[in-house]
């Protein structure tokens, strides 16, 4: 006579789900299951990263096409300083909204006073970044007394492309900034993307300075138009390239947990 198990004799027995749960706790997941879960999670993060970057690119496009409806004779070259202010506001606003929507809410239990202090620190860090970039531009040959407003707004737009994403993702934490921009210091694809977009913004700024001394007599060679356009193109290129690069190298990328 064939013996039957408890689950066969009593199909509705409450021991069956408990037994399954026990085996799930005792038996660890296989490496293949773990790798599959990490692969799915990484692909999901890459999609979120791609959509986020597309919105950031869209904010720059909006800063070009929306102002002409409200400002007469608006153009990137003729009213360049105005466009720098508008572009900085658009990009900063989109970054803040995406920070509130996309980033996990890790500070939900913190007091409102802590959030206000954190916001004020971020504002101070942004202003410090603007003044630091302004000083660096002057040391590299920008006019010291003349075109002060142009140089400072150039520093503002570069801080928007580099410092604002760092503040949104890492907060006013210098140690975290140094960790991310050190070798093998990233812990997520978001920090990896932050590296790429920041470096590409600086690289675009540097390349944008090359046409200034040339005698082409073009309107975009006036300080600091070519540099700001180079920073913008570098920022957009970084936003477009980083998700593609991360997706292409997703199987080789490994991140350390803090």
Image (cartoon, rainbow, N blue to C red):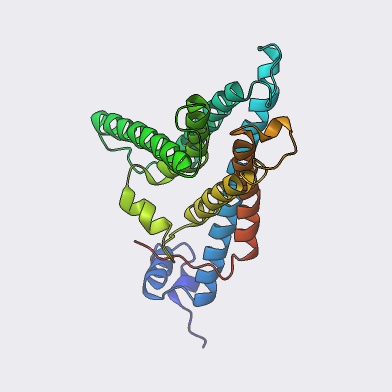
Q: Is residue 15 left or right of residue 61?
A: left
Vertical side of 83 occupied by 201: above or below: below
Q: Residue furthest bottom?
A: 1
Residue at x-position 51% and y-position 37%: 142
Q: Position of residue 78 (x, y in %)?
A: 68, 22
Q: Quadrant of residue 249?
A: bottom right
Q: Is residue 243 left or right of residue 159?
A: right
Residue at x-position 43% and y-position 57%: 181
Q: Is residue 113 left or right of residue 244?
A: left
Report whether residue 52 is seen. Answer: yes
Residue at x-position 49% and y-position 68%: 254
User: Which of these two is toward me, 164 or 148?
Assistant: 148
Q: Position of residue 2 (x, y in %)?
A: 52, 86
Vertical side of 177 occupied by 61: above or below: above
Q: Is residue 208 left or right of residue 159?
A: right
User: Which of these two is toward me, 131 or 24?
Assistant: 131
Vertical side of 76 occupied by 207: above or below: below
Q: Position of residue 258 (x, y in %)?
A: 34, 61
Report whether residue 50 is seen. Answer: no
**Total number of numbered labels?**
0
Q: Position of residue 65 (x, y in %)?
A: 70, 24
């Amino acid at each position: 006579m064939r013996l039957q198990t408890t689950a066969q004799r009593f199909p509705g027995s409450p021991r069956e789900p408990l037994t399954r749960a026990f085996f799930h706790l005792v038996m660890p997941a296989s490496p293949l299951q773990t790798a599959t879960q990490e692969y799915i999670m990484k692909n999901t993060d890459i999609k979120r990263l791609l959509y986020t970057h597309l919105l950031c690119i869209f904010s720059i496009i909006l800063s070009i096409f929306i102002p002409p409806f409200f400002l007469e004779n608006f153009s990137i070259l003729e009213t360049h300083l105005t466009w720098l202010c508008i572009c900085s506001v658009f990009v900063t606003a989109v970054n803040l909204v995406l920070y509130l929507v996309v980033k996990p809410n890790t500070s939900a239990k913190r007091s409102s006073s802590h959030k206000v202090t954190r916001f004020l620190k971020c504002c101070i860090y942004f202003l410090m970044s603007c003044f630091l970039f302004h000083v660096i531009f002057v040391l590299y040959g920008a006019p010291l007394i003349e075109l002060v407003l142009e140089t400072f707004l150039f520093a503002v737009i570069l801080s928007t492309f580099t410092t604002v994403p760092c503040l949104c993702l890492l907060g006013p934490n210098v140690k975290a900034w140094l960790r991310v921009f050190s070798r093998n210091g990233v812990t997520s694809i978001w920090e990896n993307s932050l590296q790429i977009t920041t470096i590409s913004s600086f690289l675009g700024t540097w390349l944008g300075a090359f046409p200034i001394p040339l005698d082409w007599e073009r309107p975009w060679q006036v300080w600091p138009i070519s540099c700001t356009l180079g920073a913008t193109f570098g920022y957009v290129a970084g936003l477009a390239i980083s998700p593609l690069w991360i997706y292409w190298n997703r199987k080789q990328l490994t991140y350390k947990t803090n």
